[in-house]
Amino acid sequence: MNDEQTSDTIHNPRRMMTRIYVISLSIIALLAIAAHMLLNSVIEQQLQTGKIINISGQQRMLTQRATLFTLDYLETGSSDAKRTAQQAIDQMISNHQALLSEHYKALSNNQPSGLSNDMLNLYFNKDNNVDKQLAHFVSLISDTLASPPRNIEVFSSENLEFKQMAKEPLLTALNDVVSLYEKESLDEVDNLRSAQQVVLIITIFTILIEAVFVFRPMVSKISSFARRLQWEATHDYLSGIYNRRAFFMIGEKLLHSSKRNKKPSSIIMIDIDKFKVVNDNYGHAAGDVAIQHVARITKENIRSSDVLARFGGEEFVILLPETNANGAVTLAEKIRIKINETPLSVKNKHITISASFGVSASSLSDDSLELLIQKADDRLYVAKESGRNKVEV
């Protein structure tokens, strides 16, 4: 595996997990934005509801105010009463225009009115016709205020029609308008809240789905990736056995334990004979197969408590805890024979290889792991120089 392949192995899962994570967060963010917008709509609708109900509610109060001060003006001729009555009807006109401004704007643009059918019936249907009644009431008040004050008793009953309208039917119609505004606004708020609850449920459901189908697999991939990185940090990628760094980390602990229990330990160094010739004659692929071949045979013939590592190039090392020199030599000879008797299969060719072995054993003194390896390596050198394919101790 070259550096580019290793980089792809590391970065491809990372890119995929990052992409999944970004998509998941984007979905949740969009749902959160939708919920926020709906919440804003609820708040705005409630504010608008309060404003509309307040304006429509003012109309009821203003009819009474206009009537009261108009009667006061007729009786007393008070300019203050006349001014207050005029202000009341001016405010009624302003409020009425505000309540119907969107309706008339839509009609001027050849668009359907924003008012509901029920509200249109209240404002313009002949049975209620708040629009017409309000205009008539304002006209009556205006005409009365334009007349000189006089005794109400001699005032014609027709000219006191505004007084009757302030009781019936205008007041009733205005009450109906306020009630309908309240009902429709509350219905709209309820609809928005229902939509918000739906978005909340979808958000929770999405999070649960993502937890099961996105984050859980993502955690699994991360864990698998972490295990892979840990494995690669301690193992040789070609042979699959421990690397030199891991061998020293594990070997130091095992050697220390053996010394503490007053047990011997042994080291076997292995080197493939004429490895360069194999590479030169059959290619580097054959050399890789040879390394894997020796690693596999060696691993198959050692104990689970023994530690096998690729020490570098075509060289291997075995730590045998609680094993003396005789036991190490016996094992080394067994592995040597197995390697020599099991040919490699490379491109339909059978290649016979051999390996040389150097053995060292610790005494009950303070021999370090480095020293044991050095001693075994020295014996390996002797095996190489004296003909190869042998075990030296």
Image (tube, rainbow, N blue to C red):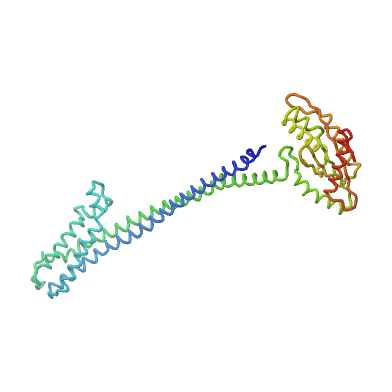
Query: Between 364 and 38, which is closer to the camera in this rendering?
Result: 364
Percent x, y of residue 157: 10, 66
Query: Between 345 and 74, which is closer to the camera in this rendering?
Result: 345
Quadrant occupied by the N terminus: top right
Query: Between 142 and 306, which is closer to the camera in this rendering?
Result: 306
User: From the viewer's perspective, is residue 343 above or below residue 94?
Assistant: above
Percent x, y of residue 186: 35, 57
The quadrant holding residue 236 is top right
Percent x, y of residue 191: 38, 52
Identify the residue at image location x=39%, y=56%: 40
Image position of 271 (left or right of 203) = right
Identify the residue at image location x=26%, y=53%: 102
Image position of 43 (left or right of 264) = left
Identify the residue at image location x=84%, y=51%: 368
Percent x, y of residue 79: 14, 74
Image position of 296 (left or right of 330) = left
Q: Residue furthest right?
A: 326
User: From the viewer's perspective, is residue 150 above or below residue 171?
Assistant: below
Image position of 326 (left or right of 67) = right
Quadrant occupied by the C terminus: top right
